[in-house]
Amino acid sequence: MTGFTISALLMLGAISAVASKSDSGMTLRKAASKHKIFVGTAVEPRFFEEPEYRQILGDEFSVIEPENGMKFASIHPRPDTGPNPYDFVGPDALVAFAKSHKIKVRGHTLVWHSQQPRWVTNGSLTPVELSSILRKHIQTVVGRYRKSIYAWDVVNEAFNDNGSLRSTVWFDHPGIGFEHQGTAYIEQAFRWAREADPRAKLFYNDYSAETIDPKSDAIFAMAQDFKKRHVPLDGIGLQMHCDLSFSRPEVLRSFEANMQRIADLGLDIHITELDIRLHDDTSASLSAQAELYSKIIQICRRQPRCTLIQFWGFTDKHTWIPGFYRGQGWPLLWDSQYVKKPAYESVLSNLK
Ligand code: XIL
């Protein structure tokens, strides 16, 4: 053998060693499954046509949730009295993708103050009409995806930051029989959802309620009351739209304590919309982000009732952050070219 061939062979060997090391087939979903944790992401079916999007989704995640497609205005854009009240095209495509990749689906969301159609919010409906519309909406949407959706965000963001109940069309006009308002309309929504699908896990979901504060106290009090009276609540969703201030030790301790009190009630915890927004993508910011992701994963892993870590998307190419937080972005695990960021490696190694 000539010197040239030997060195060429050695080089090939070195290349394939590198390739097999980085291409070991380990993925977020595989790593997490050993600990009975699911890894999810929000999804927009219109991006399925991007090959990288489809590939990463199918390989890395064990749960998907529509980022917008099951919200009231998307899925039920027109009144029941006219033609085509519902639009199931996007949600059906998402569910089909999930089935063909053995991925579970989370439903989001049945009762929310935002992304509602004008025909619901324009003030023309009486409380009794609103109540019957909501009941039929829950029956129809939950009923259609029975057996396809394993967990639902039944009610989203019903509390203000000070712990009072948010004024919404559903809270303000809760229909006949709710003279004592409070959380009665929330309870009713959970009961309707349970009727429509006795097997789906039913969640209350909110933001800025990760640590112990007036809002998470109010949610906890509602959860205690619901458990005591056997209202069908299975878990609490913590959205976790974070910035780097979440890495302060006292914040992380309070987050862990909040999860513990929810777990002590016998409820599951889903991290539902995790992202960590930055002001720039310097390597210092990206490594601080990676570090915070690992701390959050570690805290979830220490809590047996924390059974889902779900990100609000996976590529910086398609994130809601710059549109909602001026000057901020870069919150996810893959960059806008679908290249893995330091955050990806740190999430993976903490899931292993
Ligand atoms: C956001 C979506 O990401 C955006 O595309 C949309 O324009 C607005 O809603 N809390 C929630 C999510 O429960 O549904 C929100 O999603 C983000 C905040």
Image: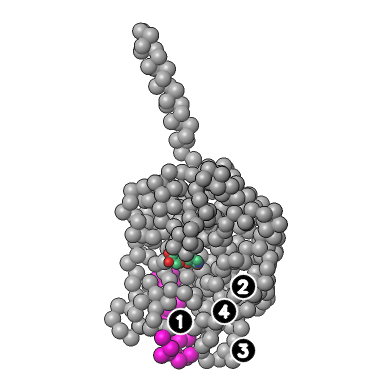
In this view, the residue in front, 255 or 32, is 255
Query: Toward which corner of the image does residue 211 lie, by quadrant?
Result: bottom right
> In the image, which disc is placed on residue 180?
3
On whether residue 151 falls in the magenta region, the answer is: no
Q: Which residue is mark 4?
A: 166
Does mark 1's beta carbon lie closer than 8 Å to ligand 1?
A: no
Q: Secondary structure at mark 2?
A: loop
Mark 2: few, some, or many residues within 10 Å (few <14, many ≥20)? some
Amino acid type, residue under disc 3 in the picture: His
Residue 230, how many percent across, how many down?
63, 76
Residue 282, how many percent across, how many down?
51, 45
User: Of the residues under marks 1 and 4, which one precedes in the sequence?
Assistant: 1
Q: Secondary structure at mark 3?
A: loop
What is the spatial separation of the Cα atoms under label 3 and label 4, in whole angstroms?
Answer: 16 Å
Does mark 2's beta carbon lie closer than 8 Å to ligand 1?
A: no
What is the spatial separation of the Cα atoms under label 1 and label 2, in whole angstroms?
Answer: 25 Å
> In the image, which disc is placed on residue 134?
1
Amino acid type, residue under disc 2 in the picture: Asp
What is the spatial separation of the Cα atoms under label 1 and label 3, in whole angstroms?
Answer: 19 Å
Quadrant of the image containing the C terminus:
top right
Q: Secondary structure at mark 1?
A: helix
Amino acid type, residue under disc 4 in the picture: Arg
Mark 4: few, some, or many residues within 10 Å (few <14, many ≥20)? some
User: Of the residues under marks 4 and 2, which one precedes in the sequence?
Assistant: 2
Does mark 3's beta carbon lie closer than 8 Å to ligand 1?
A: no
What is the spatial separation of the Cα atoms under label 4 and label 2, in whole angstroms?
Answer: 9 Å
Q: Are marks 4 and 2 in contact (CB under 8 Å)?
A: no
Q: Image check: 104 left or right of 97?
A: right
Q: Which residues are magenta?
A: 122-149
